[in-house]
Amino acid sequence: MAQHSPAPPRLCPDCNGFPVVAIGTGTLLDNGTRGTLLVACHLCRGTGSTRTATPAPIVQREHA
């Protein structure tokens, strides 16, 4: 019988699976290390994968 394998996860089209990056600020901290900022991908919000290639549209509803 054939063996079924799970579908591979879909990579985020913006970050290509690298959702969080560390950016050096150049600031020297008190302990001698450099300050860094962790920045997450805006599309997948730091997960590295997404269900669809395009984000869902934002629907705004007015309350009566």
Image: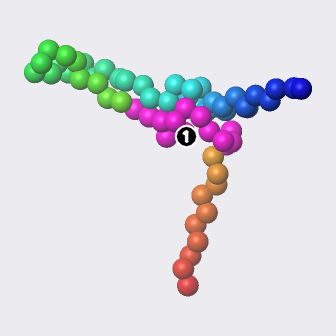
Most common SS among magenta residues: loop
Q: Is residue 52 left or right of residue 37?
A: right
| Crowd class of label 1 (few under 14; some 14 to 19; many from 20; radius 10 Å) | some
Q: Is residue 8 left or right of residue 42?
A: right
Kindly indicate the quadrant of the structure image that contains residue 33: top left
Is any atom of residue 42 visible in this view? no
Residue farthest to the front? 1
Residue farthest to the right? 1
Find residue 50 and report its horizontal and vertical position in percent. 62, 39
Find residue 16 and report its horizontal and vertical position in percent. 59, 26
Question: Which residues lie in the magenta part?
Answer: 39-54
- Which residue does the image show at 10% across and 21% down from the upper left? 30
Kindly indicate the quadrant of the structure image that contains residue 43: top right
Residue farthest to the top? 32
Dot 1: element = loop
Residue farthest to the left? 30
Is any atom of residue 48 visible in this view? yes
Find residue 20 and report its horizontal and vertical position in percent. 44, 29
64, above or below 12, in the image = below
- Which residue does the image show at 56% across and 76% down from the upper left? 62
Q: Is residue 24 part of the magenta span, yes or no?
A: no
Check disc 1 and report the residue beneath it.
43
**Nearer to the camera, 2 or 50:** 2
Find residue 17 and report its horizontal and vertical position in percent. 57, 26
Name the quadrant of the N terminus.
Answer: top right
Three-letter amino acid code at disc 1? Leu
